[in-house]
């Protein structure tokens, strides 16, 4: 019960990140930090494979976090920089899943997570447009050098436990306090020249315009209808696009990471990526066909449910046909991959629509 409760929490809590970015990622981060301790204290489960399981779920909530930047971030340079930082870590995590070389997690540090936290912490009190390109680049560099390199080395190269380190010598706490003080000073230095902060705190992200979330008929003004048609055109004019390529790369890397953790996965990494890529192309073609016919999903839940049914149907069809071709699939593992794929593709498609609207609305 404890194991499955924690696993479900690690799957469900990140879904709050698009609406409540900072509280959502902090909750996900805390749960990631304490789950192993809870397993050790309250269960007798073997933790030999904990590293792979933990990294897979880390990447899951980081993926939701990245997708939320499509929905929420108004500073386009910050978005592009965060996208690079996210995919850099994703490639490293996939390589770690395949090779199990811990040094790869040091070479490909998770700078994206703390960069996201910094941006959202600023958004609590300021418009993120106050963050200039230079300030954003300096922030990413400082996080990389002074936060993530020491942390990744400590965890993955030295394989040290901070709790055990402090218990061995309580005076080590002073070192942590000094390090935290340096980080606080760097944060103050980055923020000291910002304009006066607005009153209150903006914990919730800005809502998606109703005509984007509820279909074109939700548009209220002529200008909104015009821009919605433009968004629809961009979404449906081509099947093979940069966005389709990104979805294939994203889901392929994510599935490779999970395939290395789940028991009973017989397919190789390229086989998993190829199979899911076919489903992504089918999903994209179906969505574009609906857009061309003037149809839009009424809600993100409706889109997720319908596309899940479509994908499950395709998997059941494959499961029925493959034995005649001397092939087979593990149905349970495959359905899990498809659920993961459908969730991320649904969020990507919905939030990309918002990103396109926000980008063109600033022109």
Image (spheres, grey):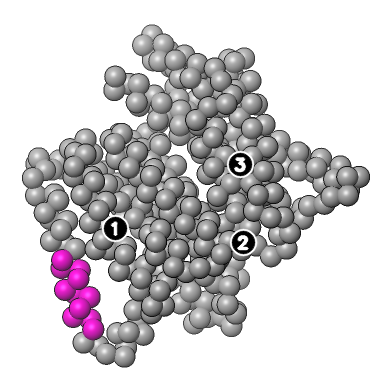
- Across and down, in percent, residue 263 comes to 69, 65
- The relative height of residue 207 versus residue 155 in the rendered view (above or below) is above
In three-dimensional space, the C-alpha distance between marks 1 and 2, rounded to whole angstroms, equals: 27 Å
Which residue: 20% across, 68% down?
A: 180
Q: Is residue 288 visible?
A: yes
Badge 1, how many Cα within 10 Å: few under 14, some, many 20+?
many
Which residue: 52% across, 76% down?
A: 39
Check residue 144 in the rendering and tell me which mark sits there, or answer none: 1
Of labels 1 and 3, the one closer to you: 1
In the rendered view of the protein, which quadrant contains the N terminus? bottom right
**Is 339 in the magenta?**
no
* Mark positioned earlier in the residue sequence (2 or 3): 2
In what element is the residue under mark 1? helix
- Across and down, in percent, residue 288 comes to 60, 22
* Mark positioned earlier in the residue sequence (1 or 2): 1
Residue at the extreme right? 324
Residue numbers of the magenta segment: 172-182
């Amino acid at each position: 019960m404890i194991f499955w409760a924690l696993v479900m929490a690690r799957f469900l809590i990140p879904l709050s990140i698009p609406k409540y970015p900072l509280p959502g990622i902090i909750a996900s981060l805390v749960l990631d930090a304490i789950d192993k301790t809870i397993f050790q204290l309250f269960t007798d489960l073997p933790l030999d494979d904990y590293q792979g399981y933990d990294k897979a779920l880390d990447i899951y909530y980081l993926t939701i976090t990245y997708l939320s930047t499509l929905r929420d971030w108004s500073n386009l340079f910050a978005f592009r920089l965060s996208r690079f930082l996210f995919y850099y870590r994703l490639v490293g995590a996939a390589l770690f899943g395949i090779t199990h070389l811990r040094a790869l997690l040091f070479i490909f540090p998770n700078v994206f997570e703390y960069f996201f936290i910094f941006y959202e912490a600023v958004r609590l009190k300021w418009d993120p447009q106050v963050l200039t390109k230079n300030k954003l680049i300096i922030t990413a560099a400082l996080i990389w050098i002074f936060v993530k390199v020491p942390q990744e080395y400590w965890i993955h190269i030295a394989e040290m436990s901070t709790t055990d380190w402090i218990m061995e010598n309580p005076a080590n706490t002073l070192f942590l306090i000094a390090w935290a003080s340096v980080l606080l000073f760097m944060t103050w230095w980055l923020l000291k020249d910002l304009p006066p902060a607005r009153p209150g705190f903006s914990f919730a992200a800005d809502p998606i315009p109703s005509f984007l979330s509820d279909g074109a008929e939700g548009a209220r003004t002529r200008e909104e209808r015009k821009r919605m048609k433009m968004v629809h055109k961009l979404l449906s004019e081509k099947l093979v696009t940069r966005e389709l390529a990104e979805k294939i790369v994203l889901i392929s890397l994510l599935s490779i990471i999970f395939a290395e953790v789940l028991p009973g996965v017989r397919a190789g990494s390229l086989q998993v990526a190829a199979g899911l890529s076919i489903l992504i192309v089918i999903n994209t073609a179906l969505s574009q066909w609906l857009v061309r016919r003037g149809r839009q999903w009424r809600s993100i839940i409706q889109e997720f449910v319908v596309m899940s049914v479509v994908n499950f149907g395709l998997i059941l069809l494959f499961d029925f046909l493959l034995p005649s071709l001397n092939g087979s699939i593990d149905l349970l593992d495959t359905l899990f991959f498809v659920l993961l794929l459908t969730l991320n593709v649904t969020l990507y498609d919905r939030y990309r629509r918002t990103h396109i609207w926000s980008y063109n609305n600033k022109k």
